[in-house]
Amino acid sequence: MKKVLDYIKGLTANIAPTKEESESERTKKFLDSVCGKWEDDRTTDEIMADIYSARKNKEDDELVNLFE
């Protein structure tokens, strides 16, 4: 979880909101900074197949242990 929070902070570090910017302007600025950054030679179907094949079935007990 810490890695995710650090990543998000890193994405938003360069986007300091100013009082003049509206929420929609800040949202657009953020999306412009991250959209189009992903590069991959695989097709959409290949990426989706990889995502589905990487999923694992977990028992409820195992999920609870992840958060303890």
Image: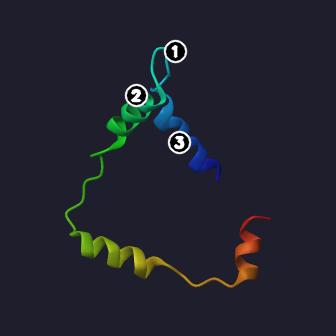
Residue at 46% x, 37% y: name it. Answer: 11
Mark 3, residue position: 8
User: Mark 2 packing: few (<14 Cα in 10 Å), some, or many (20+)?
Assistant: few
Q: Amino acid at mark 2?
A: Glu
Q: How is the image coloured?
A: rainbow
User: Mark 3 packing: few (<14 Cα in 10 Å), some, or many (20+)?
Assistant: few
Q: Nearer the viewer, mark 3 or mark 2?
A: 2
Q: Amino acid at mark 3?
A: Ile
User: Quick check: 56 left or right of 33?
Assistant: right
Q: Real-space Cα distance between discs 1 and 2?
A: 11 Å
Q: Is residue 52 above or below residue 9?
A: below
**Which comes sooner in the sequence, label 1 or label 2?**
1
Give the x, y percent position of residue 33.
35, 35
**Which comes sooner in the sequence, label 1 or label 3?**
3
Residue at 37% x, 31% y: name it. Answer: 29
* Picture quadrant of residue 21: top left
Mark 1, residue position: 19
Q: Real-space Cα distance between discs 1 and 3?
A: 22 Å
Q: Real-space Cα distance between discs 3 and 2?
A: 19 Å
- Which residue is situated farthest in the right direction here? 68
Marks 3,2: beta carbons within 8 A = no
Marks 1,2: beta carbons within 8 A = no
Mark 2, residue position: 25
Q: Is residue 1 above or below residue 50?
A: above
User: Quick check: 41 left or right of 6?
Assistant: left
